[in-house]
Image (cartoon, rainbow, N blue to C red):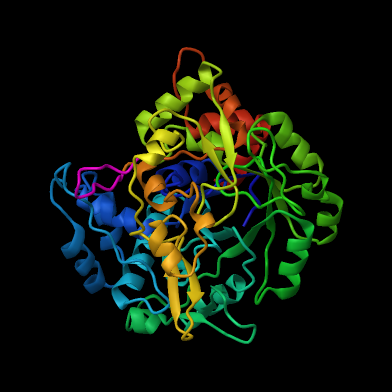
Amino acid sequence: MNLPKLIQGGMGVAISDWRLAKAVSQLGQLGVVSGTGISRVLASRLMDGDLSGNVRRALENFSMPEPVQNIINRYYTPGGKKPETPYKTPAAYSIRPPKFLDQITAIANYVEVFLAKEGHSGIVGINLLEKVQMPNLASLYGAMLAGVDVVLMGAGIPTQIAGILDKLSNHEPVSYRVDVHGADKDDDHRIHFDPEAVFPGIAKLVGKLKRPKFLPIISSVVLAQALIKRSEGPVDGFVIEGPTAGGHNAPPRGAVNLNEKGEPIYGDKDVVDLEKMKLLGLPFWLAGGYGNPKQVQAALDSGAAGVQVGTAFSLCDESGMRDDLKKRMLQKVRNEEAEVFTSPLVSPTGFPFKVAQLEGTLSEPEAYQARNRICDLGFLRILYKRDDGSIGYRCAAEPVDIFVKKGGAEEDTANRSCLCNNLTATAGFPQIRKDGYVEQPIITSGDDLVSAGQFIKEGKTSYSAEDVIRYLLGPLFQQNTLTSS
């Protein structure tokens, strides 16, 4: 695999969808789909009628028709559901998931990667989160069934993933040690996935799978060294993500202090020593604040293989963000009114999370207060050990009394938002509640949001993924495109 100069960020939920990844991949760079929450997205696309037929075409290419038909029977609505009808949602994951949940999760990831790779020979990656542990085994297997080329994973220290990729390529059973709050040091809590149990006979049908490259997303040399030392399989490179990137950021190293706006303050300890990174001998890409050609060139000059860019692609024509939100956000950029707030509280994970400020979204306190707290998707739930030794599940964004009853601290619920539902709404699949409330979007963006206007050509009001790549790579674009075709 030729090393790309540019990796398109894997933004969930469904912002980095198959259309965006395909557009980037066809232009010789690494297009990336997000696997976060993708089972909910698949179900919603089918309930919306799959008017293009793309989802059903991908499903028809899956090797086993029975689980596909079960998904169709449960979710597909010819012509699309009525606007006031709520979406049916797959069950929230537990440490012992039902077979159907593993099936729809694997197949949803298969569909996304299949569509991104369809009709060209470019490379496609998938982005998953260590913080969202329980769906990851099924997600990885489904993506591998579709021939995914690269797996990227951040929001934690993914020491287990490389070894899991090795085993899944042979359809071997795998297990994943999950983080459990309150667990004793000798406890070993795992979620299991057996390809042959979930899809009986699939190994004979499809044969050995390609083992994708593995690129952990890290924030320090120490993490890179730890992964090389502790990884249960080969690591193929790193994406080094700084605190100006969108989505979840790593917390500042050392004591956390806030600026006058209430944002975490990052300092010299959070700057990655690239000379030490080069000594590790693996390729690396820089992410967070590399949204213009000078920064791309500076990254290459520093020894990086290239850069990862998310924010610029999140607002391009091909991204999965709702069109009305993209248009309004770009108007703010053109009016020089764009603003991003790094919230230390909004994410139930406790990680800082960047929120673009836009009227009518959950960036507004009034919109946040108008929502009744509910946790029904559960992707960001944490596992905790009950007094009797069993495993429970809780989320800091669920109703406060329920969270506290489960042993959570009430102060941990302050200003926590349901990113699962909020981000799904941003992609155009808002849940409708029984009382008529419609889940509102939240937009995450890196600090580069303010300069997104540089990609808009004169006389235009939007831009494409190709506009981003041509502008960022300049003369490197034609050279890279020719060598990848």
Residue at 33% across, 57% down: 40
For the residue pair 460 and 257, the one nearer the viewer reads as 257
Q: Position of residue 414 (x, y in %)?
A: 50, 50
Taking 203 as reference, is 466 above or below it? above
**In this view of the protein, can residue 321 be seen by the observer?**
no
Taking 278 as reference, is 447 above or below it? above
Q: Position of residue 207 (x, y in %)?
A: 43, 78
Residue 349 position by quadrant: bottom right
Taking 200 as reference, is 152 above or below it? above
First to last magenta residue range: 429-441
The dominant secondary structure in magenta is loop
Rendered-image quadrant of the N terminus? bottom right
Residue that protrudes farthest toward the top in the picture = 459
The reply, left or right, for residue 393 in relation to residue 372 is right
Residue at 56% across, 65% down: 212
**In this view of the protein, can residue 23 be seen by the observer?**
yes
For the residue pair 150 and 192, the one nearer the viewer reads as 192
